[in-house]
Every structure is written in C-alpha cells, then in structure tokens.
Amino acid sequence: MTTERNAAAVERGKKLRELRLKRGLTQAQIAERVDGWNQSRVASFERGDSDLANATFRSVLQLSSALGCAVSKLAKIYFNLFFYFIFIFFILFWACVFNVRLSVC
C-alpha cells in the first residue's frame, strides 16, 4: 500500500534539508546527535515520509542542537503560527523552570 505524503510534511522536510546542508552536515551526522535516530530516519523526515511535528520534544531539542540553531527556528518551520507561540511559551517556561540556557542562531 502506497502512503501518500502530506504536502506540508514534504515542504517542511525540504526546509530541514536546507538547514542541514547550510550547516554542511550529512544525514548520518545529524542521526549521531539525536538519540534513537539513524540516517534513514533523517532521510524520511527530509522526504516528508515522516513529519517532525510528530517527533518527541527531546528529539526536537537534540535536532536543534545538532543543527546549531535555536529551537524557535525549527518551531517556525514545523508549526503554524498559533502553535508556534504556544511552543515558544512552553520552551521559555521549561527553560526557566529547569534553568536551561537556550542557544540563539
């Protein structure tokens, strides 16, 4: 059975690939830096077969670290505007509660 790819997931995957290439990283290098991921999983996200919007929060944090960019940059790619603001609020709240320093691109 052929799975139809969501057009939005495909577009987000293209943006993820652009970010990775801009940083000069391979899919394997990204996979090494995110717990539980392998090269084929990164490729699946980039093709839009899988949607990063369904990834765990921990994976998103590790991905942003691997790409050397702020979590907010990934949030802009993967969430609509309403969810983007909620996500940013959650990140800031989490950072304050756990006294975590956030990186900024």
Image (tube, grey):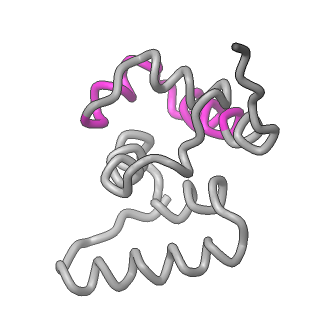
Residue at 44 percent across and 41 percent down: it is 67
Q: Is residue 54 above or below residue 36?
A: below
The reply, left or right, for residue 32 in relation to residue 92 is left
Q: Is residue 33 above or below residue 71?
A: above
Depth check, front residue: 21 or 48 = 48
Figure disc tally = 0
Depth check, front residue: 45 or 24 = 45
The image quadrant that residue 74 belongs to is bottom right
Query: Magenta includes 25?
Result: yes
Residue at 18 percent across and 78 percent down: it is 98
Residue at 47 percent across and 52 percent down: it is 69
Q: Farthest residue toward the right?
A: 7
Depth check, front residue: 69 or 31 = 31
Residue at 76 percent across and 38 percent down: it is 6
Image position, residue 16 (x, y; %): 61, 38
The image quadrant that residue 22 belongs to is top right
Q: In what quadrant of the picture does the N terminus appear?
A: top right
Image position, residue 82 (x, y; %): 68, 78
Q: Farthest residue toward the front?
A: 1
Q: Farthest residue toward the left?
A: 98
Query: Magenta includes 47?
Result: no
The image quadrant that residue 46 belongs to is top right
The reply, left or right, for residue 39 in relation to residue 19 is left
Main SS of residues in magenta: helix
Q: Which residues are magenta?
A: 13-35
Image position, residue 34 (x, y; %): 30, 36
Image position, residue 20 (x, y; %): 54, 32
The reply, left or right, for residue 101 in relation to residue 39 is left
